Image (cartoon, coloured by chain):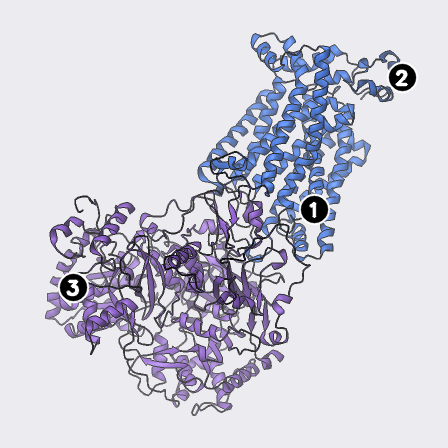
């Protein structure tokens, strides 16, 4: 067989001839991994090789180590080409990690879903996580090792390192520094310890622009034993009252999936008699979390500390033991509300929890830790030892920078990250690097930092390398590759291992070594197989954290962050926040995320300085006006965007835009707000000045121009009280004459009939479903210009409306995709019958038949149809094409497309059950959006079966169909949103 | 003509329709010489400009086929833009021709004879422009034939429930009937030109197209019957075509589109705009070609009256839409109309109202409806207004049920270029028509001359009416 298959040009896949000649098992490591800059292999040769090698080797995962491994989740007896397989792995994200199941088609990962066994993903996946598959196939990653601007190889680097190593072994690491990102990997932890042992005088600095540094520090302040790092783990499903203090815990902060799942489980009321949790949100920005609030109070960033102090004082007044803290607070105007809030918290003591935003100061986190200890306690808030994770340390940056600038550092190894781009502006890392002779950067892309370093080492994506991670609750999970490194890249683990051992070992071996080191007893091989299959293993926790010291409250409260500052109206405050799309900039070259509309502003492909309507009025600004923001002698020019409900005199600056070396997608998109960020004002600052430049950007891509529902019953909402009084309020909101149809209706007495229900009370607007849909259905990225013209292709969009006064507006979200109307208006008007009903009730789209009149889109009352105005898929790079789902047609120019209810998933489930001789059970068909929804807001199934979950949900009294008065009979229905305001506050 | 004998009494009372005391000979001379001589000087620049416009149109269509409909300003809520606006506009223009040639013929409005050829030609060229737009506006125009019920191996029929399919039939039928009607009317005049032709080539082509017409009694009898039958077939088309075009909108469920008033309102609007276009063209042509005695002020005044009537009908329809939107109590419907008048496209709405409702009111005054420059400017304004009417209707798309999907549509240079280019095509065809075809129906005009009356001598003593 090896004679027949001749693969030319392949760089990443060793030839099969070698195997035939060589012997029994495949050697997976390319002989010349360093020379892989040429990626001119075709998809066909890739598939041929994959198919052949799979059949011959019969091994499990795609990157084939010498060792036999069988990392299947659903262990098959054999591989059937065309049948995708899922592998368990883990996505590391700072010092957090999220378990994933990666779908691979013939050895090609195509989709990332959450691993249901993993405690931080629970089967769901965030938008970032799902979109990270595009980073794997990012054509801008192509290229090997670069030394001083010249292509080099890994071997060449190893040789170079060997010379340095001798020197550093001799001087114990004097002049050697590592700048790393925080991690939660036991392997990296082990290697770090070995590094410190081997080079005791070397420096190890940890930097990440957005991290939980302050949380950990705060915990230390409140603790008896301040030496150790701890992380908190929440069980919000048990909480009855939640106070979020400038905390976007539902989306913008670590562990948002578990947080959202827990929060939503307290909101999914089945009847009007069910209990609901209550969420108070006190925040400066208007966040996704604020949208779910029952009460929302907007405060300037400088008022957040005083507010917390006031709350602590009130709680103490009402009997909470906080030691010797002051009796009064200076928070006059909201004292009534704070007292009520405190009363509510006290009434729910034991199941009340306060959450503070990552960016708040350590003192705030210390106070919150103390309060939670008495308000919530375990298991709602649990502290576990950080153990093998590392935490960013900004305070150490100063001395590190000093060392560098004084020339003490001779060799700096930068493990991931992008410090040239995202370090505080006053550190001026770019200039610092010039003081160092040898700089090495291992990174996914040749980013801003790599451009400034002597050495660029391509980093393997987590989907193509071995590593491991510990989840927030200490669960161990393995990161196993699903594909051979596409560009001959090496992982951080491999680089660090080379540094500490002096030998070039495979990451597989290194990770297994760690696992051996961690496994104190038991059958190692068996456990290893288990962890490959499940993705996780529940190891003994690294021990609970000690209880905090309530007497610390007094000293904490003396900090100035709790003192009210009187500021002038012209004195603006600023918060730096990670973007919902690019995070800290690491996802800037990811088309799916760039095009993902921000859940609050609905802006895509841009960041903007967010301000409140009142502030906009004061400065005479409208959306898109460019302003100059000046802070401490630094200034940037940035367009503004008005966010109703945001605190006045406050500017929110999303980070992660304005990259210059991100790649073809992300370079020069948006404005780099890091330029205003300094070490003493990492997260927020006062004293910002804003001046109008008179210029404006009118090409900002906003996917939703209109934010008001115009009084229409679109998102139906009531308070819990109203719901109790009028349980059928959602349906009663629309009156219409009896509906009769012109057409003869389909007979669905037999077989399946698909339908969907979306619980608006559980939906938090996080966009995970949008990315899931994009990944599953090969939805093209169209770019800013097309989005700005209103031609985004997302089959599923999340509508965002504001209601109430602009200053105190409340936000609601509603996911809208094709509603699969029974009397579909689109079907009636298509002249060529390209959109028709099938016998299971789906409104199907026949791409081949479509001539593109767009009449169906005009006649769709939900406007969910998407038209291919251009050939949007033509220019997809070859590597990126590998991320596409082979089960879904790629649409050409001139045809209409829309949500299919994941018809390919229905068909696969039907085929699988038919082969098994069974009938489809409820839950066998899971749509992509439903699968990934962190809160389980989306339910899909057979509505012919009265016992199916979807039938039951649809029958709830909160259920309604959008625009049902048009008699289009949508198959997707919604459950009305219920808010649970405090009756005491309602009265006042 | 077969009806001539019945016309005698009206003819006696009416002042002569054609001024300048013409004879059969002079009519033939006046009309034929336009075709036979070199075209007047202005014809060349006019033709050059028009042809340039037409070529630009073809170029832009080529680019459209190459790139896709994305070159236009279309977006997600607004799936139809200028292409559909232009389609309805051009179909509407066409209506006057059919109305003049068919309905006025059946109603024995003898004054039509001076302008019917003209108007019919305009109809055909307008329908050609109109047909182009739905063809090029689809995403995959290379499979546009799937809209036709052609037998195929897939046994796939078009969807007969779709108004776009009805459109295909309606406009297709309209084009075929209008063309036949025009051509049949041309035959006697083409024969006249053939007889007068001097060169071999002219003789050959006019000979071919006049289909061996000799003007014999039998031929005239067959001709008159054929003409009458075609007039009968065309008459319902005047009403049906634009009614069916209106169902593209009326059968949808969009607020602002889903109304039963559309068919009559569209027909009235079509006649309105058609007459305005005939007016614009005939005012120019009668001056430039010295035909003021054939196309008299009397004709123009009557067209003004028709515009006044249809313009008022259109205005009434606008008012009714608003009333019904309020009276229905349907919030979406009410909003759609308030949004029309006061929303982002209010400017377009008020241009429409000014041009279509206010401007024709000038024609209540005899002085104004007999002043050439007033009616000329008014006719242009009315066509602008009627274009905006279609624009306003199509732009209803921009705000429908869910505010989240609302957006704004702005045309690109390609939208504008194709629209301008369609005028280039229209005028190219029209100028070629003026150059090579008799622009006034000689045989029919002769039929309404006093000399054509059997009682000619007696009548001439009575008729001392005004000759403008």
Q: Mark 2 sits on what residue?
A: B462
Residue in the image at 65% along x and 28% along y: B123
Q: Position of residue B127 (x, y in %)?
A: 61, 31
Q: Which mark is residue A505?
A: 3
| CB within 8 Å, label 1 to label 2 | no
Position of the N terminus of chain B, as image quadrant, is top right
Residue in the image at 56% along x and 44% along y: B80
Q: Nearer the viewer, residue A691 or A872?
A: A872
Q: Mark 1 sits on what residue?
A: B260
Q: Earlier in the sequence, mark 1 or mark 2?
A: 1
- Label 1 secondary element: loop
Q: Chain of mark 1?
A: B
Residue in the image at 48% along x and 78% along y: A243
Q: Nearer the viewer, residue B205 or B426?
A: B205
Give the spatial CA distance, label 1 vs label 2: 51 Å
Give the spatial CA distance, label 3 vs label 1: 78 Å
Looking at the rendering, which quadrant does residue B194 occupy? top right
Does A680 sit left or right of B170 as displayed? left
* Disc 3 versus disc 2: nearer the observer: 3
């Amino acid at each position: 067989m090896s004679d027949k298959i001749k693969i030319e040009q392949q760089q990443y896949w060793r030839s099969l001839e070698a195997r035939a000649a060589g012997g029994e098992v495949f050697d997976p490591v390319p002989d010349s991994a360093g020379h892989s800059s040429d990626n001119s292999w075709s998809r066909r040769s890739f598939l041929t090789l994959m198919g052949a090698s799979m059949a011959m080797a019969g091994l499990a995962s795609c990157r084939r180590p010498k060792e036999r491994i069988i990392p299947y989740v659903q262990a098959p007896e054999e591989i059937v080409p065309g049948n995708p397989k899922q592998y368990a792995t883990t996505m590391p994200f700072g010092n957090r990690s999220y378990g994933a199941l990666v779908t691979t088609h013939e050895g090609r990962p195509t989709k990332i879903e959450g691993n249901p066994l993993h405690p931080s993903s629970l089967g769901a996946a965030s938008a970032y996580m799902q979109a990270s598959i595009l980073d794997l196939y990012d054509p801008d990653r192509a290229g090997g090792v670069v030394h001083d601007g010249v292509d080099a190889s890994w071997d060449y680097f190893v040789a170079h390192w060997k010379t340095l190593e001798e020197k550093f072994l001799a001087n114990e690491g004097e002049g050697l520094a590592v700048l790393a990102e925080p991690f939660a990997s036991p392997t990296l932890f082990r290697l770090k310890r070995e590094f410190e042992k081997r080079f005791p005088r070397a420096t190890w600095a940890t930097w990440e622009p957005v991290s939980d540094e302050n949380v950990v520090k705060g915990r230390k302040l409140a603790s008896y034993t301040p030496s150790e790092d701890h992380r908190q783990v929440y069980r919000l499903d048990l909480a009855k009252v939640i106070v979020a203090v400038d905390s976007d815990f539902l989306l913008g902060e670590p562990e948002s999936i578990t947080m959202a799942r827990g929060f939503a489980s307290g909101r999914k009321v089945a009847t009007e008699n069910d209990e609901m949790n209550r969420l108070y949100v006190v925040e400066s920005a208007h966040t996704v979390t604020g949208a779910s609030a029952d009460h929302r109070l907007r405060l300037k960033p400088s008022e957040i500390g005083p507010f917390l102090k006031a709350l602590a004082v009130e709680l103490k007044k009402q009997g909470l033991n906080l030691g010797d803290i002051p009796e009064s607070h200076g928070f006059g105007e909201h004292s009534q509300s704070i007292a009520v809030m405190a009363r509510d918290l006290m009434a729910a003591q034991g199941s009340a929890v306060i959450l503070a935003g990552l960016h708040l100061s350590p003192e705030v986190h210390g106070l919150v830790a103390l309060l939670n200890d008495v308000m919530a306690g375990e298991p709602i808030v649990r502290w576990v030892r950080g153990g093998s994770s590392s935490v960013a340390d900004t305070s150490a940056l100063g001395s590190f920078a000093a060392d560098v600038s004084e020339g003490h550092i001779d060799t700096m190894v930068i493990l991931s990250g992008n410090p040239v781009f995202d370090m505080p502006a006053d550190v001026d890392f770019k200039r610092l690097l010039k003081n160092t002779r040898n700089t090495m950067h291992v990174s996914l892309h040749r980013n801003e930092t790599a451009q400034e370093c002597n050495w660029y080492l391509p980093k393997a994506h987590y989907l193509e390398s071995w590593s491991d991670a510990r989840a927030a609750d200490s669960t161990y999970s393995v990161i196993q590759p699903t594909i051979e490194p596409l560009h001959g890249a090496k992982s951080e683990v491999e680089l660090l291992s080379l540094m500490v051992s002096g030998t070039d070992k495979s990451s597989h071996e290194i990770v297994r070594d760690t696992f051996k080191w961690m496994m104190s007893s038991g059958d190692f091989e068996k456990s290893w197989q288990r962890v490959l299959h499940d993705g996780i293993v529940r190891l003994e926790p690294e021990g609970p954290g000690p209880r905090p010291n309530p007497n610390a409250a007094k000293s904490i409260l003396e900090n100035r962050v709790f003192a009210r500052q009187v500021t002038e109206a012209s004195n603006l405050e600023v918060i730096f926040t990670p973007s919902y799309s690019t995070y800290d900039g690491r996802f800037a070259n990811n088309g799916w995320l760039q095009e993902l509309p921000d859940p609050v502003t609905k802006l895509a492909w841009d960041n903007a300085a967010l301000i409140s309507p009142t502030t906009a009025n004061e400065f005479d600004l409208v959306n898109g006006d460019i302003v100059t923001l000046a802070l401490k002698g630094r200034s940037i020019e940035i367009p503004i965007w008005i966010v109703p409900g945001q605190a006045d005199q406050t500017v929110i600056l999303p980070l992660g835009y304005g990259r210059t070396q991100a790649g073809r997608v992300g370079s020069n998109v948006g404005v780099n707000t890091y330029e205003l960020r300094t070490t003493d004002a990492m997260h927020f600052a006062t004293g910002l000045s804003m001046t109008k430049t008179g210029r404006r950007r009118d090409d900002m891509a906003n996917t939703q121009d209109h934010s008001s529902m115009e009084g229409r019953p679109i998102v139906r909402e009531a308070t819990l009280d109203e719901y109790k009084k009028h349980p059928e309020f959602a349906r009663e909101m629309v009156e219409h004459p009896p509906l009769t149809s012109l057409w003869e209706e389909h007979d669905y007495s037999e077989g399946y009939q698909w339908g969907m229900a979306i619980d608006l009370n559980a939906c938090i607007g996080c966009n995970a479903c949008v990315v899931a849909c994009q990944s599953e259905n090969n939805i093209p990225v169209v770019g800013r210009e097309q989005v700005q013209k209103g031609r985004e292709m997302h089959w599923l969009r999340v509508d965002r409306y504001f209601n109430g006064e602009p200053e105190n507006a409340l936000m609601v979200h509603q996911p809208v995709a094709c509603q699969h109307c029974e009397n579909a208006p689109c079907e009636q008007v298509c002249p060529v019958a390209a959109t028709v009903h099938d016998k299971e009730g789906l409104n199907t789209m026949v791409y081949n038949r479509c001539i593109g009149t767009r009449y169906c889109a005009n006649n769709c009352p939900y406007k969910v149809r998407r038209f291919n105005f251009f050939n949007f898929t033509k220019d997809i790079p070859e590597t990126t094409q590998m991320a596409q789902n082979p089960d879904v047609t790629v649409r050409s120019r001139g045809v209409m497309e829309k949500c299919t209810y994941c018809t390919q998933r229905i068909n696969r489930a039907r085929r699988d059950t038919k082969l098994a001789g069974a009938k489809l059970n409820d839950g066998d068909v899971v749509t992509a959006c439903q699968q990934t929804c962190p809160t389980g807001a989306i339910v899909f199934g057979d509505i012919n079966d009265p016992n199916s979950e979807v039938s039951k949900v649809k029958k709830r009294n909160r259920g309604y169909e959008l625009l049902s008065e048009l008699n289009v009979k949508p198959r997707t229905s919604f459950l009305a949103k219920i808010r649970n305001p405090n009756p005491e506050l309602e009265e006042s | 003509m077969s009806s001539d004998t019945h016309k005698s009494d009206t003819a006696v009372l009416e002042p002569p329709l054609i001024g300048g005391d013409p004879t059969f000979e002079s009519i033939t001379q006046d009309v034929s010489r336009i075709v036979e001589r070199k075209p007047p000087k202005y014809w060349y620049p006019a033709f050059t400009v028009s042809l340039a416009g037409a070529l630009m149109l073809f170029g832009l269509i080529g680019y459209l086929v190459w790139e896709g409909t994305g070159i236009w300003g279309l977006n997600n809520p607004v799936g139809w833009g200028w292409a559909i606006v232009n389609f309805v506009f051009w179909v509407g223009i066409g209506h006057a021709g059919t109305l003049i040639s068919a309905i006025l013929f059946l109603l024995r409005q003898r004054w039509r004879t001076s302008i019917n050829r003209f108007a019919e030609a305009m109809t055909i060229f307008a329908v050609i422009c109109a047909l182009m737009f739905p063809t090029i506006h689809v995403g995959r125009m290379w499979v546009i034939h799937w809209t036709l019920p052609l037998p195929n191996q897939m046994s796939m029929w078009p969807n007969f429930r779709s108004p776009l399919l009805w459109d295909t039939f309606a406009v297709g039928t309209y084009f075929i009937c209008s063309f036949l009607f025009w051509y049949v009317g041309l035959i006697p005049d083409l024969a006249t030109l053939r007889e007068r032709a001097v060169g071999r080539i002219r003789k050959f082509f006019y000979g071919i197209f006049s289909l061996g017409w000799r003007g014999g009694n039998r031929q005239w009898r067959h001709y008159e019957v054929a003409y009458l039958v075609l007039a009968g077939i065309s008459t319902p088309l005047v009403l049906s075509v634009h009614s069916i075009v209106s169902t593209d909108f009326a059968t949808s469920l969009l607020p602002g589109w889903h109304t039963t008033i559309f068919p009559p309102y569209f027909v009235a609007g079509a006649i309105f705009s058609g007459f305005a276009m005939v007016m614009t063209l005939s005012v120019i042509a009668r001056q430039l070609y010295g035909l003021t005695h054939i196309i008299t002020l009397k004709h123009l005044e009557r067209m003004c009256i028709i515009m006044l009537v249809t313009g008022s009908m259109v205005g009434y329809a606008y008012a009714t839409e608003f009333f019904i939107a309020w009276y229905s109590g349907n919030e979406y419907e009410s909003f759609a109309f308030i949004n029309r008048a006061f929303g982002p496209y209010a400017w377009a709405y008020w241009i429409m109202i000014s041009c279509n409702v206010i401007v024709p009111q000038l024609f209540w005054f005899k002085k104004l409806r007999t002043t050439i420059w007033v009616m000329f400017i008014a006719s242009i304004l009315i066509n602008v207004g009627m274009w905006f009417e279609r624009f306003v209707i199509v732009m209803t798309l921009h705000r429908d049920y869910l505010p989240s999907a609302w957006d704004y549509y702005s045309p690109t240079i390609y939208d504008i270029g194709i629209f301008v280019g369609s005028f280039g095509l229209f005028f190219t065809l029209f100028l070629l028509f003026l150059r090579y075809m008799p622009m006034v129906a000689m045989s029919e005009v002769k039929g309404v001359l006093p000399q054509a009356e059997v009682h000619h001598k007696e009548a001439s003593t009575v008729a001392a009416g005004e000759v403008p």
